[in-house]
Image: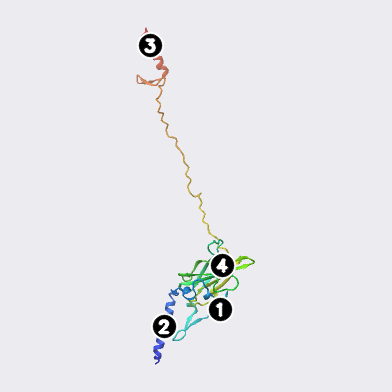
Amino acid sequence: MKRPLPLCRWMFAVIAGTLLGNSLAVAHADDAELRRLLHGPDRCDHVIGLLLRHGVNNTANPAAAVNAFHPYGPIAIPATELGDLQLESITRHADTTTECGPSFDLVIKNCSTRDVCGAHVTLVGLLGRILPTSPNVTAKLDSVPAGQAVQVTLTLPIESLAMGNLNGQVIGMNRVLVVVDSYDQFMESDEANNLRSFELAALPVATAVVTETTESAAPVSVETTTPAPTTDASPQTAQPSSPSDIDGGITSPDLRTAIDQFTDNANTQ
């Protein structure tokens, strides 16, 4: 038994309004780890499916509206309400440790009017054609604010350094593939610009910022010793003649000697 037509239209309007209303706030991805549920942590089958659908290094002009299918009929969502995730830049690290493969810095930009939470970014190392077992790494972006960009560092497995053999010499990867929203969890205005391939030798090398500590700014303490007043502990030697008060006056040493001699002569007489 079919439902009355006015009720269907009312439910369709409520669902469409709810969908558009929720999309204006924050876009969330699935909480489950699709990598482990669908393909496992060491495979990149999901990337191969996106390559077959959108190609690589492509872009598409967004239409005025995107049709989203619903059990009650298609919903036309304006392209301005969808936004787009895209790769801004990629740089590789100069140093490679012996325990792991090369590392790369990716800058992902959110060209939309809402925050995007839970998007996945996959990096694949290539030597020739891509295989489901090609060395890859997937990272989850917790939050990309609206209109802003975030940087994430991805490190490929060590297998990316030994992907082939040339006359007994081990050779590593020569290309990298970057896939934004690698599990296709978000509806975007341009899905084709999510897959980018680069030559490894053509990637710029990230320069490490070294903060130098200048010691000249620190105050240099110069120890200056002030000579303390010297106190002679030895007993003072008696001066040959010291001034003394005679008749309320100060007598010089020569005058004192003359007076003593005069007194001695008077006593002798």
- Of 157 and 208, the residue lying toward us: 157
Q: Which residue is mark 4?
A: 160
Please state the horizontal and vertical placement of residue 237, each as a whole percent of the image.
41, 23
Q: In the figure, 237 relative to 35: above or below?
A: above
Q: Which residue is mark 3?
A: 264
Direction from residue 209 to residue 262 in the image, left or right = left
Mark 3: give few (<14), some (14-19) or many (20+) Cα within 10 Å: few
Residues at marks 4 and 1 touching, judged by CB atoms closer than 8 Å: no
- What type is the residue that disc 1 sits on? Leu
Please state the horizontal and vertical placement of residue 150, each as a whole percent of the image.
49, 67
Mark 2: give few (<14), some (14-19) or many (20+) Cα within 10 Å: some
- What type is the residue that disc 2 sits on? Ile
Identify the residue at image location x=37%, y=21%.
244
Residue 60 in sight in this render: no
Residues at marks 2 and 3 touching, judged by CB atoms closer than 8 Å: no
**Separation of marks 1 and 3 at Cα, in angstroms:** 138 Å
Q: Which residue is mark 2?
A: 15
**Separation of marks 2 and 3 at Cα, in angstroms:** 139 Å
The kind of secondary structure element at disc 4 is: helix
Q: Earlier in the sequence, mark 4 or mark 1?
A: 1
Q: Which residue is mark 1?
A: 52
Give the quadrant of residue 57. Answer: bottom right
Mark 4: give few (<14), some (14-19) or many (20+) Cα within 10 Å: many
Q: Which part of the image, by quadrant, shows the C terminus?
A: top left
